[in-house]
Amino acid sequence: MTVARPSGRAPDALRPVRIERHYTRHAEGSVLVSFGDTRVLCTASVENRAPGFLRGKGEGWVTAEYGMLPRATNTRNDREAARGKQGGRTLEIQRLIGRSLRACVDRAALGERTITLDCDVLQADGGTRTAAITGAYVALVDAVNWLRKNGAIARDPIHGAIAAVSVGIFQGTPVLDLDYAEDAACDTDMNVVMNDGGGFIELQGTAEGHAFRRDELDAMSALAEKGIRELIALQRAALAE
Amino acid sequence: MTVARPSGRAPDALRPVRIERHYTRHAEGSVLVSFGDTRVLCTASVENRAPGFLRGKGEGWVTAEYGMLPRATNTRNDREAARGKQGGRTLEIQRLIGRSLRACVDRAALGERTITLDCDVLQADGGTRTAAITGAYVALVDAVNWLRKNGAIARDPIHGAIAAVSVGIFQGTPVLDLDYAEDAACDTDMNVVMNDGGGFIELQGTAEGHAFRRDELDAMSALAEKGIRELIALQRAALAE
Amino acid sequence: MTVARPSGRAPDALRPVRIERHYTRHAEGSVLVSFGDTRVLCTASVENRAPGFLRGKGEGWVTAEYGMLPRATNTRNDREAARGKQGGRTLEIQRLIGRSLRACVDRAALGERTITLDCDVLQADGGTRTAAITGAYVALVDAVNWLRKNGAIARDPIHGAIAAVSVGIFQGTPVLDLDYAEDAACDTDMNVVMNDGGGFIELQGTAEGHAFRRDELDAMSALAEKGIRELIALQRAALAE
Amino acid sequence: MTVARPSGRAPDALRPVRIERHYTRHAEGSVLVSFGDTRVLCTASVENRAPGFLRGKGEGWVTAEYGMLPRATNTRNDREAARGKQGGRTLEIQRLIGRSLRACVDRAALGERTITLDCDVLQADGGTRTAAITGAYVALVDAVNWLRKNGAIARDPIHGAIAAVSVGIFQGTPVLDLDYAEDAACDTDMNVVMNDGGGFIELQGTAEGHAFRRDELDAMSALAEKGIRELIALQRAALAE
Amino acid sequence: MTVARPSGRAPDALRPVRIERHYTRHAEGSVLVSFGDTRVLCTASVENRAPGFLRGKGEGWVTAEYGMLPRATNTRNDREAARGKQGGRTLEIQRLIGRSLRACVDRAALGERTITLDCDVLQADGGTRTAAITGAYVALVDAVNWLRKNGAIARDPIHGAIAAVSVGIFQGTPVLDLDYAEDAACDTDMNVVMNDGGGFIELQGTAEGHAFRRDELDAMSALAEKGIRELIALQRAALAE
Amino acid sequence: MTVARPSGRAPDALRPVRIERHYTRHAEGSVLVSFGDTRVLCTASVENRAPGFLRGKGEGWVTAEYGMLPRATNTRNDREAARGKQGGRTLEIQRLIGRSLRACVDRAALGERTITLDCDVLQADGGTRTAAITGAYVALVDAVNWLRKNGAIARDPIHGAIAAVSVGIFQGTPVLDLDYAEDAACDTDMNVVMNDGGGFIELQGTAEGHAFRRDELDAMSALAEKGIRELIALQRAALAE
């Protein structure tokens, strides 16, 4: 028996994923990533100095900022710049993106530089943070390649690939890559970040309805692993173009 | 003798202008407007209540917010949400957009509603505020038509069309629709908002280098009028699709 | 072979845990919880109205705020009230505490009330968020019992118990309830919130050094389950006094 | 046929203008300027260092801040310091004042100094920004003369004079120097900043009611030119005392 | 032996005090008070509703706000509106002014109204808070008389008069009404608020150098009493005009 | 005839005072001070650099911050960190604590260091600021002794002792050390800070009901002197342990 997902997808199917590089022209890396109707513009900006707490240590830094356009969602949200502060959800997500991408960067090889990954959601349909991580990785690679092409750094500071996907328990069935309709109705929602070696970088599961069991955790982890393998293949294909 | 514009355009030529409607799916009006490499996403959001100062007066309101993605420009700008406030330039521009579009709206016919025009710059190359006004007009019309189709309002609250363009004195010659290279180098920069009757809605001229004379003001006004006529034709064509 | 933990504890041993009820006298629930040298004051405050988004729906709300005294840690941190905003870490933790405790509350049975759990760290030595959740549960029960004793609510809105603990991989070995020395040196850090039925409420794992594998995730989950069983027994004992 | 202005003035008549130098004793330049009942205290403060973005370039800076006492107007406005931010109108005006006055300053001759023009409205009756620019010019000259008298700068960094006035279309007639009663009722309001050579520094016209035509723009510009000529004569007379 | 005060005044002499009523025209009470070179504009604004915490209790409120123009002092201070918050000194002073004036107001007789006293320092030379209280009292009386003349309130809510002065120990001698030169150099500085019955409303003494003794406290209190008697006579004379 | 104090104390009796040193383990000085049910945690943190305005002058600084846990009081107060600013009362108190303690410190002997006294109220029952000053003095001495033991400073920068107590007029009688029940009902409230030589450091009296007379001021001062003598003896005893 299979669950009827609102989108008609199989439980283990990703939404159509598109990774468009060079979407805007100023940034060293600029990627528009789409997970179905979720669209996030990820830019990577290189600055030739490390943040204060690393000054003089010969290491670089990778950090992220996240934003959502006020009408990316079904009803308009207040603009955070107008409200005068970023909300807790925004801060939580941008901390997650930054931590996740630092996991594939050799900061000594990067040298005293900062790469800032701006992930701005143009349209939201669930999974914006996982799309952001998946797209930001490609923007980061483009920015690093720009540095290498310019002779600014000698060896590649990127080791491996990073991608992310959400999984959940929807009507009792573990499903991959939740869209908004599923996210709003599911019992458990878990965001998983993994590398291309199949190791976990981050795993954040939340019981929305009833608590989830160990076997559900196992099933969701396995689904996430499958989805991330596919996402990493799509990242490679995009970078090969 | 003709001035050599960095873009190779004739002094009275607009950049290629593109107006894409329905760019995102949630907003009642959603337009991606491009003036050359300047790209602004304009969404119109309808809310069924008037702001506090109009409550109970039977009138609606049209307002605007403006933002620029951190890496829309050549070097990254701090994210206003992270800095905790909108800068003076941002506030000035969003006030201008709101005033300009209210000039074509019969607020009593709109009823106790608020339409918020969010103008977010994805990529900047000069003229972001004039592109925003030109695109926001189309998003506003789409939102109003959505209201009319739903039977929410009886008569059309929009009278006429509104568009905007910049003009300036570049190397002694009046030119139309400045891109960033011209904007940074010109002596005078003037933003003009007009309606389809050829009347001025807003006119803001600033001498960047030497002061400008009355005859230069006349020449710039004439250029703006020509450009806005063309922009209004493009708005009409887009709305006719 | 067993890992040498800085504290000399066995890998699966909690620190000494103390739960002191009625620590301060004004709050409806007031608990000082200690996980070793980590000490958190958790108060539960009852307010007889629901927050705005629930007004008139017959449901209550449980929310949390988290703070750390400036010198709770080894070097002084800026006071968030003086800096003018709560940091991302603070917001993330207080969102986690609130979500975790709402998982054991029947909000309809609570009625249109708000219970705010203030978790203030007096002294920090790792695991402040898990100590906070574990102590806040006891303060919440005390506050609910106060409501019941006063006849304000008819049936018990609390179902089950909630506790939390951290687990990690320290020098290759899964260990329970990390103190600061371990937290700073470990490869993976995972915070786990469970209920007394052994179900997961929240699970947040972060690879600090190398990525963690599925078998490590399993080992850490099992350790967490053991620790939380013990913590729930301690909560029960404290509530029985 | 002449329009009946609320004040009884001729269409091309300024209000009585008074420029009192040395109004307060601490500032290097201190001017109380009155345009009828509009009274603005303009002080010029000299600081012996350039702002960060000019450090080490051998150039100075002139900037402005604008404020309105809470009860300068007919109904009390919130104090911006208490609200925790300057409004959009305030920022817009102070940016205008700063730009306008920089137009008459040779920043290299000023040297690495900052002159800050604080324009604080004690009483408002329309035209506060134009009165502020006109008064701030005199305060600026006083501050520069103080620097020259002290031997701090060799050659005069001020070239020409700057003054400002508002013009508008009131009941169909172009009028000069609008007071509040006219400002609230007029169809078009235009603020004009010019130098003593008759060149435009800034020109900001807004259609409050119907859009304005080219001939109206011409008539308003001519009126502004007349008014500014008179204001510059009054500035000279004040500086000659 | 008498101390040589920088101003040449006798130890028990006030500076020349001037109280100008109706200084600005919009406020219900508007007073420019001068204590020597200290000049404070005090306006009283009447609003026909009580603040939230008094709504429906049949009582009014009197509150104060304090500000200092950036260049009221010898070196320019940052504008609090631009910095985005009021400093501790400002808040402390405006709380003192509000408390002091509420001491002479029968809030039930005032009815559900708020009177806000804005005290803005145009020029500072020591004693700005005591000048503010002394001037604000006159503005408050004018505002209350305006209410009575309009028939808004039946009986006078003002009982008695309130004035304030500073005293200190300067070079070992108790002196009255310190100017800035004395304030910066004195050992003890005490601000005293009294009513016309000779009772203390507020008394705030601070040892700037060595601690002060009981006999010094007595001498300062006596001086303050003398000064306040004179100030209350000046208030009466001003109100009698 | 003696007044019946709610607590049953004699008019000149302090509440039970407890001073617990080394309450938390990270700070150089850490004191939990109790005045009856008022409990304040005072920590002293040493930083090896002076604040900006003293850099390079060979002097140190002592400063204070004050906070109250949200549920230290009978009804919950908003968390200042969440509201985004410290209130006027908080700023006023922390300025008072800092000034008071600097009165016993030879800042040249301290050297270019900053000692920050964090005073956080765990439970409030009146007199939190006077308890804070009294406890912070002990924490300051402990921090200075830590510096001396480590050989960081040669001679003792502390001269004398500082303590504080409140006094008031309760039902016509001068009483010592007001608890909350008295504070809320008394006519006059005065906070007094003195040194061990019997000199006044700060004296802040406020008439809550009727104005207070000179003889009442005298009686309150005498009571304060007695209370502070006792508090200084308790400080000495605690430091001798």
Image: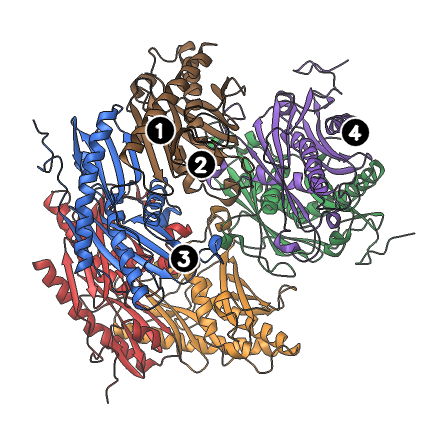
Chain colours: A brown, B purple, C blue, D green, E orange, F red
- Chain letter for mark 4, please: B
| F131 is higher (above) or lower (below) than A179 | below
From the viewer's side, name the closer residue of F202 and B59: B59
Q: Position of residue B9 (x, y in %)?
A: 71, 15
Instruction: Answer yes or no: are tags 1 and 3 on the same subunit.
Output: no
Q: Position of residue A214 (x, y in %)?
A: 27, 34
From the viewer's side, name the closer residue of F201 and D23: F201
Q: Position of residue F150 (x, y in %)?
A: 11, 43
- Chain letter for mark 3, please: E
Which residue is tagged 3?
E89
Which residue is tagged 4?
B225
Crowding at label 2, few (<14), some or many (≥20) Cα neighbours within 10 Å?
many
Residue type at tag 4: Glu
Residue type at tag 3: Arg
Location of the C terminus of chain E (image quadrant): bottom right
Viewer-nearest of labels 3 and 2? 2
Which residue is tagged 1?
A192
Residue type at tag 1: Val
Most distant residue in the right direction: D1
Residue type at tag 2: Asp
Structural distance between the alpha carbons of marks 2 and 1: 15 Å
Which residue is tagged 2?
A183
Location of the N terminus of chain E (image quadrant): bottom left
Residue F238 vs residue C163: left or right? left
Crowding at label 3, few (<14), some or many (≥20) Cα neighbours within 10 Å?
some
Viewer-nearest of labels 1 and 3? 1
> Helix or strand or loop: what does disc 4 sit on?
helix
Crowding at label 4, few (<14), some or many (≥20) Cα neighbours within 10 Å?
many
